[in-house]
Image (cartoon, rainbow, N blue to C red):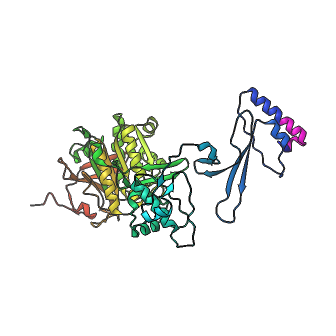
Amino acid sequence: MAYLSKDPLRYRRQILSLKDFMTGKHCTVLLLDDRTSREPDLQLHSIVHGVISLDRVPRDYGNTRRQLQVLKLRGTSFREGLHDYLIHTGGVKVFPRLVAAESRGKVPNETVSSGIPELDALTGGGLDRGTSTLLMGPAGSGKTTIALRWAFSAALRNEKSVLCIFEESPHTLITRAAGLGMGIQKFLESGLISLERVPRDYGNTRRQLQVLKLRGTSFREGLHDYLIHTGGVKVFPRLVAAESRGKVPNETVSSGIPELDALTGGGLDRGTSTLLMGPAGSGKTTIALRWAFSAALRNEKSVLCIFEESPHTLITRAAGLGMGIQKFLESGLISLERVDPAEMPPGQLIEKVKFYVENRDVKLVVIDSLNGYLQSVPGEQFLTLHLHELLGFLNNSGILTLLTLAQAGTIGSSMPTPVDVSYLADNILLFRYFEVRGEVRQAISAIKKRGGSHERKIRELAFSDGKITVGKPISNFHGVLTGIPTLLDLDPKP
């Protein structure tokens, strides 16, 4: 505004006019001004109601010190002088200048013992409350130890102390005190929380916290993921499946394809988990999506947590197979959660799933795929532990869960998996490619259904003509699951 006004007088008039206008509108106005000269513009100060000056004080080492000073605040008493402040993620923290005169109180007429009679004798029976004592001497002469002795003695009397230490580390101090008969560890805190950073080969560092101690209070043990983000800290408590006991309805969930339902013994039971396992591109995601689409047709909600495929590709591919899920996405019957394993810790994914179950009333959860989920946890052991709790929670909540797992390779009997979670799943659907007369075909079979019967046959699976087709049981071939079947002569000549 000063440059636009061209001369100082016009500039001040413009500020005054702006102030009068805003005052008439009952507005509180903050004017920002860069100080281009050492001398303050006193005429400008006289126009406004308040003036706050902010300074940066450089130091030879460490962070720049920031200070603010209230120079003027018309009609209000304020604390004068310089006040330190910090700018940090989440806002600004101001530390008002301490005024001792504001803390007048009645000081008890008593002495504070160090717990060492000879030392108390030297100080006339102890140190008086409400006094300050300087312990002075060369390095290593025992100043910190003597001060710590008074704090330890106070703790034995159930009195609280605080030690502000600049040079020595807490660990060294605690160890050294213990060696001198002062076990201060038990007095240090009512609670102890450990924060850890777990580096990963790629992506964001994983942060975890653990409550090690919280005196007089029950707390959730174990490691809990947390994020530091703009606005604060978000903690994702470790999931405990045993806390989610509920009544699970005794009913099956149809895929909407009669042949597929027949393969699974009439459909998949609510409150169970199903592992869809096979090579890449064999139809695992499509079949899982078919169950979600069928649920949406019944006005039941589903959520799909997808790691690899983009939502656009999934929507387009589904539409090409007769599953127009776009309208269900808009209505909220189907939700898509894109998961980046390099950015999202596993605790956050579990929290998202839990939110949909407890707040969105979803009946079906799809995790596509466990290969992507494995990338967000440090190893197979942790994945199985996470899945054990997650599937326990979903099963107890009556949710049908579908998990896809891609196996290495395309055709053959040996197809290793990156992680063995088959024992965690209640049901397993196996997908395979097989070759017949130079043509690659697909097959699906149910190899496990805990708590119920299922078809033992292998059926052909096809994705063509804008639909999903599950054929009749394959009975004229042997070795379909190996990928190279043998044609059987079912009608031998006499």
**What range of the chain is rendered magenta?**
3-14
Residue 307 figure quarter? bottom left
Looking at this view, is 191 or 224 the one in front?
Answer: 191
Quadrant (top left, top right, bottom left, bottom right) of the N terminus: top right
Q: Is residue 12 magenta?
A: yes
Do we see residue 483 in this rendering? yes
The answer to whether residue 475 is magenta is no
Which secondary structure class fits the magenta region best?
helix
The vertical placement of 359 against 462, above or below, is above
The x, y position of residue 251, in whole percent, is 23, 38
The image quadrant of residue 296 is top left
Q: Position of residue 80 (x, y in %)?
A: 71, 44
Q: Quadrant of the C terminus?
A: bottom left
Tell me: 274 left or right of 375: left
Residue 455 versus residue 376: which sits nearer the camera?
Answer: 376
User: What residue is rendered at 14% in x and 57% in y?
Assistant: 491
Residue drawn at the location 83% of the way across and 52% of the way down: 38
